[in-house]
Image (spheres, rainbow, N blue to C red):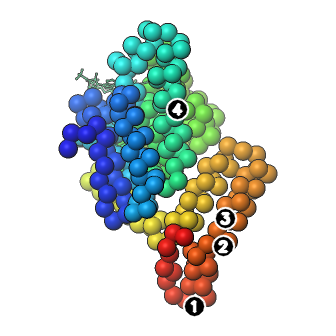
Amino acid sequence: MSDIVQLEISDRIALLTLNRPDKLNALSYELIDRLMTLLDAIETDHAVGAVILTGAGERAFSAGADITQFSGSVRQGTPTALRDFVRRGQAMTARIEAFAKPIIVAVNGIAFGGGCEITEAAALAIASDRASFAKPEIALGMPPTFGGTQRLPRLAGRKRAMELLLTGDPFPPARALEIGLVNAVVPHEELLQAARALAYRILRHSPLAVGSVLAAVTRGLNMSIGEGLIVEAEQFARLVPSHDLGEGLAAWAARRPAVYTGR
Ligand code: COA
């Protein structure tokens, strides 16, 4: 398959693969647009309950925004650079962050710049022991622009994030685990298997309940706790009339496995 982002669906999991290995899966405008189109399709596909996002080739998840391409937008001035580069990239990470189904990033190698920002935005991430992370934008004379100044401090804490953002130095998967950027580090050969195993642990549950947790956590993190508690209550209220909540409670009472329908 030569698609710039590959999609394979099996066992209720959509596997998305960034596919520009000769450019370390740099995030060109075409790649971002294709990823957004595929996410739209996956979100409405009832056969899919979880997404794994990884990179093609032996070296990289993604080395970040396509520097050659966005340099052209920068040369055209601020309005073009904001419209074509920054807004496009921010829309992508916001979409990944707020996606209605769990996205697990399987970080198979270099995750620099935008590759790291995708990892920050996703609900879950597992890193290969060969992964390498960095916030190298500072070395290009700019701050990160796909949410990297906002999500990493929220995730890792201000001073940990500042060090990474201000030095641009690469950091290993063990550090990514320590600062909460990934959920686990696994041997490289086991990466996709580990991501699938995590997906299956989620797929056992009602897709409605999964969606409600994703929405409440992600929206609540960006609000005061008072507003977040209202979101939490709203998410529960939506499920009260659902088949799945009745089924989950009945199955518990009967000590039998629940059979969820997503309704
Ligand atoms: N944008 C565009 N092209 C990129 C890229 C990026 N972010 N990262 C890598 N590439 C391309 C290289 O230009 C090269 O293409 P070429 O063979 O046609 O010249 C190819 O991918 C391989 O990269 P290369 O730099 O030769 O590999 P390396 O092992 O020497 O270095 C990195 C690896 C990751 C250190 C280096 O590619 C790099 O610094 N990339 C940019 C990282 C970055 O700053 N990202 C944030 C952007 S805002």
Which label sits on residue 241? 2
Q: Spatial distance from mark 2 to mark 4, Cα to Cα?
A: 36 Å
Residue type at mark 3 is Arg
Which amino acid type is shown beneath numbered disc 4? Gln
Q: Residues within 10 Å of mark 3 (few under 14, many from 20)?
A: few
For the residues carrying marks 1 and 3, which lies nearer the camera in this image?
Answer: 3
Q: Residue at x 49, y 17 (%)?
A: 81
Residue wearing tag 4: 90
Sequence order check, earlier mark of 1 and 4: 4
Q: Are marks 3 and 4 in contact (CB under 8 Å)?
A: no
Asked if disc 1 is less than 8 Å from ligand 1, the answer is no
Please give the residue where the numbered disc 1 appears in the rendered image.
Answer: 254
- Sequence-first tag of 3 and 4: 4
Distance from disc 1 to disc 3, alpha carbons, whole Å, reads 24 Å
Badge 4 density bin: few <14, some 14–19, many ≥20, Cα 10 Å: some
In front: mark 2 or mark 4? 2
User: Which numbered disc, 3 or 4, marks the residue closer to the eye?
Assistant: 3
Q: Earlier in the sequence, mark 1 or mark 2?
A: 2
Q: Earlier in the sequence, mark 2 or mark 4?
A: 4
Say what amino acid the circle numbered 1 marks: Ala
Q: Is residue 132 above or below residue 53?
A: above
- Position of residue 263 relative to residue 166, above or below, is below
Judged from the image, the secondary structure of the residue bearing numbered disc 3 is helix
Q: Position of residue 89 (x, y in %)?
A: 48, 30
